Amino acid sequence: MSEDLLYGRHPLLEALRSGSRRFEEIAVLEGGRGTGFSEIIQRARTLGIKLTFRSREALTALAGTAHHQGVVARVSSTEYVEVEDVLAVAEARGETPFLLALDQLQDPQNLGSLLRSAEGAGVHGVILLRRGGVGLTGAVAKASAGALERLPVARVANLSETLRWLQQRGLWAVGAVPQGGTCIWEADLAGPLVLVLGGEGRGLRPLVARQCDRLVTIPMRGTLTALNTAVAGAVCLFEVLRQQVRQPPVIPHSGAKKTLDTRKLEE
C-alpha cells in the first residue's frame, strides 16, 4: 500500500478519530504544547502507532513545509472511490444527491478549501479529473482541515462523459461561470444535482460547459470580475444547501443500473 504524509493537528486528529487511514508513524514536536498535542499522543499510544519526537527543523524536512503545526505522520494514501459509490452515500442517507465536480483545479489550497466547504454543505462526494488537476496531497489534506477524511472523492478520465452518466441517473449538471449564467439566487437548485466548478483562470472548458444543463453566475457589484475559485465555490455550495433544506428529499429514479465507463480518454 502506498503512503502519504499527513501534517497539521486538525487533519491528523480527524484521521485518527475517523479511522480512515492506516498510520505507520506519527512524529511530534519535542516539547510541543497546545490544542491537539495531548490527544494525538494519547490516541497514538492507545492504537499502538509508532510515536517519535523530533525537532522543528526535522519535522519541516520530513513534511517539506514549515506549516506542519508540530505534527507529521506517515499514513496510507487516500483511497479514491467510484462515482457510483458517491451516489450510494446519498441513497443510504435518504437525501437528495448533491455532488461537486471540479474541472482541472490546480491549486492545492483551493481544493482543500473547497473540500472543507463541500463537507460543511452536505455534499455526498467530490469528482476530480484523473489528469489535468491537483490530486489529494498532504497540502490538500491540511487545507481541508479534516474534511478529506470525511468526504468520498472519485477520479474520472472524462468529466463530460461522467456528467452525461449522472444526468442519465436523474441529476442536473449545474456549471458555475463568472459571467453570462442565470443569477444563482434565481436558479432552481433544490433537486438532485452535481455542481461543476472550473479551474483557476480558465474556468469551465467549453465541452464541459456545454454538457451542463444550466449555467449560473454569482452577481457582483464591485469592479472585480470574478471571485477566487474557493470563495465562489463556497457561495454556490451553500446556496444549493439553502434551497435543498427547504424542500423534502428528492431521490432520483435510476431505472436500470448502468456502470460508468471510466476507461474513456480525457477530453
Image (cartoon, rainbow, N blue to C red):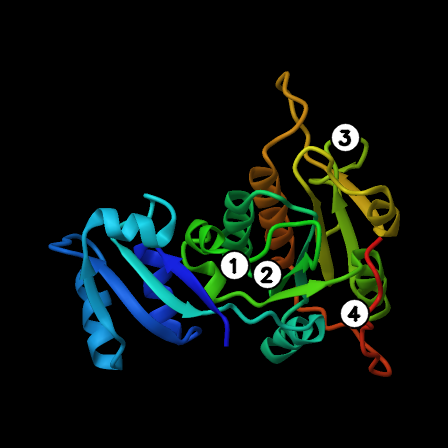
SS state under label 3: loop
Q: State the residue at coordinates (59%, 34%).
A: 228
Label 3 amino acid? Gln
Q: Mark 4 points at which residue?
A: 262
* CA distance separating discs 2 and 3: 25 Å
Q: Name the residue under label 1.
A: 119
Instruction: Indicate which disc, 4 or 1, sits on the residue closer to the N terminus.
Output: 1
Residue 104 x, y percent position in the rendering? 70, 47
Quarter residue 209 falls in: top right
Q: Name the residue under label 2.
A: 123
Label 4 amino acid? Thr
Label 2 amino acid? Val
* CA distance separating discs 3 and 1: 26 Å
Q: Name the residue under label 3.
A: 179
Density class for disc 1 (Cα within 10 Å; few <14, some 14-19, many ≥20) is many
Tell me if 45 is positioned left or right of 212 in this view.
left
Which one is in front, 246 or 260? 260
